[in-house]
Amino acid sequence: MIPLTSELVAIGKTATDKADAIAQAVDLLTAAGKIDPRYGASMMGREAVANTFLGNGIAIPHGLPKDRDLILDTAIAVVQLPGGVEWGPGDRARLVVAIAAKSDEHLQVLSNLTDVLGDEAEAERLATTTDPAVIVARLTGAEMPAAAPQPAVEDFAQGFDAVVDGAHGLHARPATTIVEIAKGFDAEIRVRHGAKTGNAKSLISLLNLGAAQGAALRISAEGPQAEAALAALQAAFAEGLEKEEDTGAAAPEATAPGLTGAMATQSAYEGRLLPGVSSSPGFAIAPVFKFARDEVTFAENGADAGIERAALEAALKTAWHQLEELHDEVWKKSGPARAAIFRAHQEFLEDPEMRAAAEALIDQGRSAAFAWHAVYTERADMLAAMKDTVLAGRAIDLRDAGLRVLQELGEVKSAEAHLPTAPCILVADDLTPSDTARLDPELVRGLCTAAGGPTSHTSIIARSLDIPAVVGAGAAVLDLPTGTPALLDGAAGVLVAAPSEADIARAKAAMEALAAERDVEARERYKPALSPDGARVEVVANISDVAEAHAAVEAGAEGVGLLRTEFLFVNREAPPSEDEQVEIYSAMLGAMNGLPIIIRTLDVGGDKEIPYLRMPVEENPFLGERGIRFCLSHEDIFRTQLRAIFRASAHGPVRIMFPMIAMVSELEAALRIAEEVRAEVRAAPVEMGIMIEIPSAVMMARELAEKVDFFSIGTNDLTQYALAMDRMHPVLAKQADGLHPAVLRLIDQTVRAADAAGIWVGACGGIAGDPLGARILSGLGVQELSVSIPSVAGVKAVLRRAPMAENRALAERALAAADAATVRALA
Ligand code: PEP
Ligand code: MG
């Protein structure tokens, strides 16, 4: 706890202006030996770039991070100005809380202020008391208000009680789940935690509840669909709002240093230890590089409220679309769970309370940039001040999403030059998901952040990119100049500055052992996946663009088992023309150099919405006009694509695959159209196949098999439809495991039907790339596995090691298991 004594509190003062008020606080801090008086200039510097007025008459001037060395001893000083002083247009500060903090000790003070911010009477008491001890007691948390404050907002009559069950409380993703559910209903929904009440449709408002694990909540609703909304929310609470990944279970060594073997490992180093928390395992040896972020400048006042409102609206829209692209990109690379954070960022941008607050400031004459900046930084500061570290960690997500909008509104001074150009260990105060997405994993050998935790998205993304990372290493890491030789031990959670030769030798030995295994796999990536008992499985790749076609070959893929063509249709204003598609497919075939490509026709709908296609708004898009259904009702788009595929087929071996076939009649219609198109363009016949990803297709596999040359099992969708669990569902997705015996039995049935008809079966869903999944699927008789590019070499290696007889026995046991966990335990 930061010390605050009565000498650092000045009561009953007056100030001519903001600078005078800050100067008074600086005098107090200087007299107490806490700061070099030049820190006052730093505080004024901060005022030039940020608004430190929190609301309810409270301002928190503080210096710029670069001037931390002017702080001799962390402290705060309070200047009480009962008459107030103008802090910004329309803002009068009556309690000036000047903060000089070397790191984050002041957060507790901010946290105590957070309560005062919502309590006008308490703010008035502090602004007028004649006893400095009252302020000291309030800001140090020694004294809490005598009686528990009454909820400012009443609960609605209908409601239920719930308890927050996730280890990290009601943080961004569980709160996003609530918001997503709540937004689907025409009802006003309140969530109360103690005296605080939040709007269930506002992510920030929910985060501000500060509800930690075990917190009791009251959820109440009013309006036409109140009952249904409450039922849906109650079911979500009963199910649990957390995913495994949210709980930190996925984080290796998600413990504080000193609690486990990590400390022992750390202390074995001889260089200067900068301990943090393990975030992503692995070693990196490279010079330090300090990361810098773009700076945005903007005017405080706007020209015209109408224009500024429109500018804000446009910026929010642009930022939302950027997040959509980022989401799709990460989704493609790392799957829906990893991409989910960008959905949460979109949620921030849609937050009705933030928008209303920004518009209110605009109406008072502020520019859109100033208003938006004030609104999101105020809320992010409040989040950052929360006691719960995971909730506090979400402040960075809000700042990230906020900055994205601000960059559209202000003038951006690019920090591009501050991105690394040579291999490095990148050091930053914290990294936002957007920052991380900009980094070149080729150059960033390791990541170390002063703030952040193992469940932060920096950590999740670092793990998915396979970059060793340490988080929460404290402000000291920011003092390391760029170029400092360093070693990062991700598993031990430590950055070692100026490591000794012995340190480097040890880390290198460990790195070599780790790399050796991957090297063997990589070296043998072009060898076929031939089992010791002579069974061959083809390992091919899932791709979505030309660059990935090149990468797939380089990774050892024996072809492409799934080209997701919908990615050629996203992020543009109109569908790609026939010629454009011919060019793309031909370029891919060129890259494959004779290896076959399975081109899947457009699979839009479900979670893939393409604005210019004006797809219908559906209650259940995954059960709506998706995949082949969309193509059959938009024949022009379908025919254009088929023409392009057949024309490109002159450049290499092509197979055509239809997605989401549920019924024989759909297949017949699609085949008829394809045949007409083929005749038109006078192309040679190609192999025709379908995705098996709907249970009805499994049931009809015998009939379907008679009409095509191959099946490819889409285990992602087959799992979601078999288990009736939305594959994107924030709560259910973790149970939607493709290794569930129900799914495996459907696959078994499919393979048997295909065998009877004499056609081959592949699989292209997520479990094909899972080492255990690859063995079980091949044991079930699947002959081709289409996996993500980074998994190609590993899957081939697994299949080369395991005799097929063993895979068959494994598959038998998996089919007989009662649940997915039992199947996974077979590994
Ligand atoms: C699947 O459903 O398993 C599949 C591979 O297709 P997508 O993930 O593109 O729906
Ligand atoms: Mg699918």
Image (cartoon, rainbow, N blue to C red):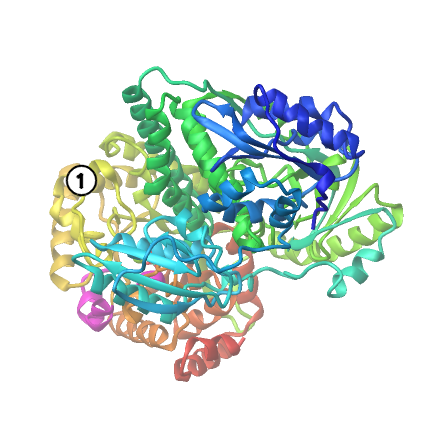
Residue at which label 1 appears: 614
Give the percent coordinates (x, y) of residue 169: 49, 61
Task: Report the front residue among 209 and 442.
Answer: 209
Give the percent coordinates (x, y) of residue 779: 44, 74
Q: Quadrant of residue 740?
A: bottom left
Q: Is residue 742 above or below residue 476?
A: below
Q: Is residue 355 above or below residue 258?
A: above
Number of marks in the rendered image: 1
Give the percent coordinates (x, y) of residue 187: 22, 55
Give the percent coordinates (x, y) of residue 824: 49, 74
Q: Which element is circle 1 on?
A: loop
Who's the residue at 14% across and 58% down the image?
A: 666
Q: Quadrant of residue 19?
A: top right
Task: Report the front residue among 306 and 624.
Answer: 306
The reply, left or right, for residue 663 in relation to residue 790 is left
Can residue 593 be seen here? The reply is no
Residue type, numbered disc 1? Arg
The reply, left or right, for residue 236 in relation to residue 30 is left
